[in-house]
Image (tube, rainbow, N blue to C red):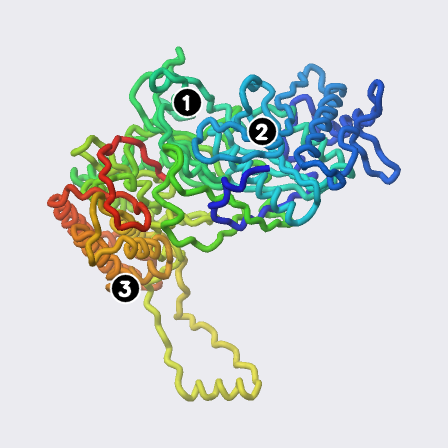
Amino acid sequence: MQSSGSRSSVPAVLCDVPQLPNEEFLEGLPLPPFCAKREPAVKAIVEELGKAVKGGKAPLTKNKAGTYTWAAFPKEPQYHTEHESTVFAQLEGVANDISGAISACKWIEGAPVKKYFDYKNNGNRKPDSGHRRDSNTSRPDAYAIRSSRSKNKGDHWWDIGPVGEYKKVDSESNFHDDAQKVLWSMNVVMREDPCRRSAYGITIENRTTRLWFCDRTRIVCSQKFNFCEEPEHLVSFFLTAMYSDETSLGWDPTIKRVITKGPKGKPEYQYDITVHQVGDGGVPEEVVYRTEELLSQLAADGILGRGTRVWTARRVGADGKTFGDLVVIKDYWVDSDRRREGTIVTTLRDEAEGIKEETQRMMLKNHVPTVVGHGDVRIHGSPDETKAFRDIHVKKCVTIDLVSALIPLRESTDKGTGSHISIASFVKRPVKRIHVLDPKTHYRIVFKERGHALHEEKSLKVAFTVIRDVVCCLCAIHLLGWVHRDISTGNILVCGAPGKERGLLTDFEYAKRCDDVDPVHQLRTGTEYFMSIEADMHTYRYRPREVNPVSAVEVSIGLGRIRAGLKQPPRRETRKDEHRSLPFRYHPLNDYESLFWVSLYMVADRVVVGHVPGPNESAKAQYAVARLLFYDRAWRTQLIEVERPDTALNLLASLHKDVVPVADLLLELKEKIYATYLIVEKDPTTHPDPQKSVSLVVEPLFETFEAICAHLDKHDKLYIKPFPGYTNAPIAREDDGNEAMGGTGN
């Protein structure tokens, strides 16, 4: 059971959940160490359950019809008049009977039979949220909770393992409701606790049961079964849910929660995080960092994806105390076949050493982060990968279409959890279908520098000073033959003390050499609000189009054949000298277009603090234009390809008078970018030449941002903030400054 309030504003995503045959699903579950194999272990437990206990009957009896009756849960739920929370509380008795049978069985000699989790009916209680102060009102019907938890305090999400949702009546609507709720609870498990790598669940409608699993790449469920007709499947699940250790059930042993003294001596929770990196001489080493401040966890709000979290941290010594400089540690899941971000950044910095010109060399080195250490997370000596159920995408599985409500709220919540993108501010993209993402590997990287994301910057002058730095950095990267492929306001950081700010381009996970052929991945790279048009469409858009004129005679003949009911003649074969369209390959102009969208965003989606709009200005009109540009592909395409479309004119008319020149210069820049597209994509037989692109556009880029910065030097009191809503009231000036916080590269 859960409140719908926690999900009411969440946009829907159509989630195709593959159903595995029960035997395959159960084989993928972790097995306690005292069991040699699952099938004989479950068989032994079922046999033990069939034995009569002292002074009573057996916990599980087989009927003449071949079905079974659980002594603790004898009556079908649909025939009960009590509330479902009362009815399914009987499952606690079933779990206790299974636990008793496990204790009575003979197992591998010397292997301890340890119960790690207790099954608990939850009723209508809300587990405590240790790290979120937002409206987390989820209340799962039941869950397995750590036996080692502190019993004198309320239940915490960080102690909860597999979760359950139940209904008395088996119906399609009840199944979908249970499925959504169990997925939401599994989602909360994954987003609430940085120690989680995967989650499990169970749903029951009357006696129809399904089992669930998720990690960062997939959500799967078992085929349905009746827990009284096939009790061995329920036994198998409870065997795993109660007797598998924490690591087996998805906890990460390389992250440990610690209690530290916070402000004014109050206790607060931090994490000791182990980074598996290559030390001096190529020797692997484990370095432990203790977090101090959560910078970002927005990307961890959903189940699927990278699950990125970012903290500031310091090293932990052998004495358990912290020492050294403050660094930034980033924990996320990377596509297993991708080059690691730390390797890419280190390679770029090394290649920069070969640049003869000092200015160009420092353009790169000053504006990309310094890697302190990085490496794949290792658990019990092996890389932490999304291995479970990896082969489901090649199996013919039944799928269930669910409106799963798994996309997180985008409104700002707890510190470090919000976003620059508000749901109310943008056009919703088409509903996406989620199937199975590419296999991922758990990865950590530590950076020397810290700063705050560009979208958090309040000074328009500082924002464009930083963007100008990124232009320099991008040009250097492109001249080395690389592309970034994920330019966004979150991946550009503002670093340095006030008055000495500099830009830092981060998140190089998707960066690659221009001539590298990428492996095929399920999702396109890039942040959609700032993605170039052709990268979004994944095709070269500015190729010349040759149109062969059709003669009047050909049209007449064609119409005559149609009227006569004759088939059209076969289409002519393609001539040998005709060429097919080349597959799209990301190139430098796509990065520069993304930077244009980032720059326009800082103008179009921001209002000037303390400004009362004049008669020719309209915050509502500006808001409407911003919604179209972030994100509606048709309007974005029109803005790029039409010299001065209505959207551009409406934007200019709605802006603050001192911001208009900035927008005007940006619109001139996009025309030059568009003209460059037409030049470099003119030859349809070749991919665009990266060096030619840079040579053609670099001068307009520098001129544009130099002109913008020169204008803002004269208007250095322009402070900006996101839209406060549909109002023309003056916006109060915030004097809290720009504290040097960390941004996220997501």
Farthest-out residue, top: 319
Cβ–Cβ under 8 Å for marks 3 and 2: no
Query: Which SS class for mark 3?
Result: helix
- Of residues 588 and 611, the one nearer the viewer is 611
Q: Which residue is label 2 attached to?
A: 161
Give the x, y percent position of residue 678.
28, 63
Q: Residues within 10 Å of mark 1 (few under 14, many from 20)?
A: many
Three-letter residue code for mark 2: Gly
Q: Which residue is label 3 attached to?
A: 646
Cβ–Cβ under 8 Å for marks 2 and 1: no
Nearer the camera: disc 3 or disc 2: 3
Q: CA distance from mark 2 to mark 1?
A: 21 Å
- Of residues 426 and 542, the one nearer the viewer is 426
- Does residue 717 lie above or below 89 as drawn? below
Side of 360 where 241 appears, left or right: right
Q: Which residue is label 1 attached to?
A: 270
Q: CA distance from mark 3 to mark 2?
A: 54 Å
Tell which circle, 1 or 3, labels the residue nearer the N-terminal end.
1
At horizontal 57% and vertical 85% (from top left) the residue drawn is 565
Tell which circle, 2 or 1, labels the residue nearer the N-terminal end.
2
Three-letter residue code for mark 1: Gln
Three-letter residue code for mark 3: Asp
Tell which circle, 3 or 2, labels the residue nearer the N-terminal end.
2
Nearer the camera: disc 1 or disc 3: 3
